[in-house]
Image (cartoon, grey):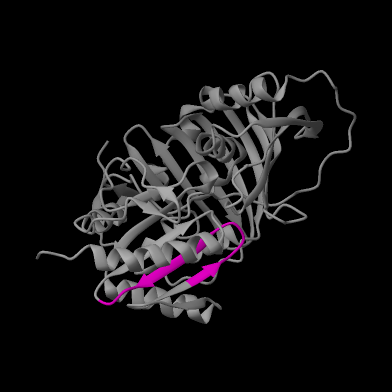
Amino acid sequence: MAIRGRMIGRRALGRWALVAATAVLACAVPAVLANLPVSSAEPGAGVLRQRVIDSAGQTYTGYVKTQAELGLPSLPQLSDVTSLLSGFTDIRVWYRSQDQNRVDVVNTLGERDVYQTPDGVYTWDYGTNLLTEIVGTEQVRLPRAGDLVPPDLARRVLAMDPVDPVVSLPPRRVAGITAAGMRLRPTDPATTVGQVDIWADPATGLPLQVQVTARGGTKPILVSQFIDVTHDNPSDATLSPPIDAAGGVSQAAAPNVLNALNQLGRLPLPTQLAGHQLQPQIPGLPGVGRYGNGLSTFVALPIPDNVGESAQDTMTKAGATTIHMTTGHAVLIQIPLLTVMVVDLRFRTYLVAGFVDQATFRQAATDLDQFRFTFRPTG
């Protein structure tokens, strides 16, 4: 099939892309639950956990409602991410496999779809009838609506924390299915995540509802729930980008966040921050240091001074706290779940972000300040 290629130079996501790319966990808030009677014959929490992990091969078609209350400040050029993590989202999803699925976001302004195909990723804006092929590899990308659907969100959380135990929750009706429930409660007191509640189809392990509550919180601030779902295998026509209807395909380069991060990999990072050991290198990301484990993981990376200055300005306007140190200062802000800090040490700037509390980051800032004295660039 001939595809009319028109290269569209996508604007760089800007300085905030490096900040936003660190926020991988995304989800949404409670919808109204059905008050139908449920069965008590459900698998144990450990069995359910494994079924959820093994459910990636389960096909499904459904309608998801999400709401997020992360309090994410308005970020330049990243309005889609802001609305996704700080508002309501209606999502239609058709899933055959990890490389064959479709996610539609529908709102009052129209419809925007993402097609994941074996050949790559396509986006379609229904209002403008613009179909775009994303050219290039997206090893690191910003959050999308597909990251919010219960199956993807639940499996990601369980993959992040394979150690902490789960306990059973009472079953509930979700999308007409008697769902078995379990709760993951991280044991590390430093994490900002208080608990993650997951309800799934007990037979297939397909997650149907996910609720995330911040530590010390009294209600979930992130929840994603199926309103309607079947295990149907979507048709080829449904999963195929509407090339004919759109009259061709435009092309846009994938956001070059990965290359931007790799360019910063020449500067070393401390072997320990705030008592957390530097973990093995993230594949393909030599410039990013990963510290801690499970839901207490945070990352640190050197960033260009101008990026740091812009981020500090935005964070300060959003109410961030300034920490004064020997050779510079740090700007720290915490929204529910996510803590972000920029450490400015004169001619060297670091970005630190993750699901840990402010006390941990304050100590990390002090450790980076001390590292400034122990490491001297040779070039």
In this picture, residue 104 sits left or right of residue 265: right
Is residue 302 in sight in this rendering?
yes
Residue 345 on the magenta segment: yes
Quadrant in the rendering for residue 283:
top left
Residue 353 x %, y %: 45, 59
How many marks are shown on the rendered structure? 0
Q: Residue at x 54, y 28 (%)?
A: 234
Identify whether 127 is placed above or below 55: below
Residue 2 x %, y %: 25, 40
Q: Residue at x 62, y 26 (%)?
A: 49
Which quadrant holds the N terminus?
Answer: top left
Is residue 78 in sight in this rendering?
no
Residue 153 on the magenta segment: no
Quadrant in the rendering for residue 55:
top right
Quadrant in the rendering for residue 8:
bottom left
Identify whether 297 is placed above or below 230: below
The segment highlighted magenta reads: 332-346
Residue 370 x %, y %: 33, 66
Q: Residue at x 40, y 69 (%)?
A: 342
Residue 61 x %, y %: 60, 32
Identify whether 222 is placed above or below 117: below
In this picture, residue 248 sits left or right of residue 104: left
Identify whether 367 is placed above or below 313: above
User: Outermost residue toward the left?
Assistant: 379
